[in-house]
Amino acid sequence: MDAQPTGPMAPPKPDADGNYDSPALRALGKVWEAFLEEQAGPGDVIGVIAKIGDFAYSQLRLLEKQVEDGVSNPDEEAFSLIFEAFEILLEGCEFLALEFAEEIPEDLEVPPDGFFLYGYDLIQEATNQMMRGHTLAMEHIEAMADVNCPFCEQVNSRENTKCDKCGRPLMTAPLEDSGHAVDLVERQGLEKRSPGGGAAADEGLTKNYMLTAELLERWKAGSADAEELEKHLDQMENGFLGHLGETKQHEQMIKRAPAAKRAALMEALEMTRQGLNLSLDAIEKMRLAFDNEDDRYLFFGLTDLEEASRVLVDAYWANKEAAK
């Protein structure tokens, strides 16, 4: 058997039966054991199931959005394995919940060990399939870390500018085009500084923020309705979730960047994640306006979105500086 990698990059290992562990499986096992020992009630178990189901649903939405935006290819084996795994995860949650259902569909046969254990096995199947998908994805990332010399076919590290064997220049992409926070200028609408270095009136804000502020002004004036506002919030949320998902791949790419740049690039990436999470929180606060029928939440959320946009712009410039 080949030696397993060690250290922070070492992949998870399966047990003797070839099964992988996951936070969902651990949470389900813990609450089910507490339920059997009468230390937890049906509501506690259903609460855990609901959280897992919500997570699977949100991830499916994210993956669908990535396909829609052209970020991911649904025909790639790794993507399809992961997408199907989340579908199996949702199916498993449905069976888990049937353990506490008052009525069972007549055409549904009760599994010998009960619905919970049957659903748990589906969650295990989903976890194993997800690991296969992630393994393929990581192999793809590893392959991207190397580049073949077009002159002598020598395999070089992507951070090389010249071939190790023949010394000729390599066609490698610059760091600032690798999909880090810099790409948010075009894809998420960050305002650029003027060529002369002067500060524009809206410097430090994103176009997302500016568009949202303009839309709320129209909302106050009665020229924008709730449907238009909710659609705008949905579009922003999908965009932020998509970028947040991509940061995992960006982190792996940064680990293959020249050592002198890694710390600064990672700091910029963490700042990007912070800005994206703050943006998502701001959107959730704005949605409270519809749940509570209180328009003030729209403007409370806008204030939070302004702070988030400044963090994203700072992340952009930090990344650009680190990638020089």
Image: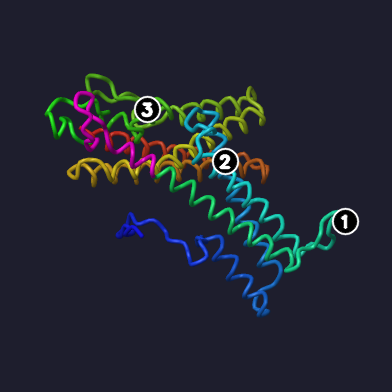
On the picture, is 324 further left or further right than 55? left
Q: Nearer the viewer, mark 3 or mark 1?
A: 1
The residue located at (23%, 47%) in the rendering is 263
Report the quarter where the N terminus lies. Answer: bottom left
Q: Nearer the viewer, mark 3 or mark 2?
A: 3
On the picture, is 154 further left or further right than 21? left
Q: Earlier in the sequence, mark 3 or mark 1?
A: 1
Q: Count residues near mark 3 (Cα–Cα under 10 Å), then give few for <14, some for 14-19, many for 20+.
A: some
Secondary structure under tag 1 reads loop
Q: Residue furthest left?
A: 167
Q: Quadrant of residue 247?
A: top left
Q: Residue furthest top?
A: 195
Where is residue 143? Give x, y as percent. Answer: 33, 38
Secondary structure under tag 3 reads helix
Q: Which residue is mark 3?
A: 185
Q: Which residue is mark 2?
A: 286
Q: Which residue is mark 1?
A: 106
On the picture, is 199 further left or further right than 97? left
Residue kind at label 2, given as amino acid type: Met
Q: Earlier in the sequence, mark 3 or mark 2?
A: 3
2 vs 137: above or below = below
Q: Residue furthest front?
A: 1
203 vs 144: above or below = above
- In the foreground, 221 or 166: 166
Q: Count residues near mark 1 (Cα–Cα under 10 Å), then give few for <14, some for 14-19, many for 20+.
A: few
- In the foreground, 102 or 232: 102
Measure the C-alpha gap from mark 3 to mark 1. 55 Å
20 vs 214: above or below = below
The residue located at (43%, 30%) in the rendering is 188
Where is residue 44? Give x, y as percent. Answer: 66, 67
The residue located at (58%, 45%) in the rendering is 58
Highlighted range, magenta: 139-158
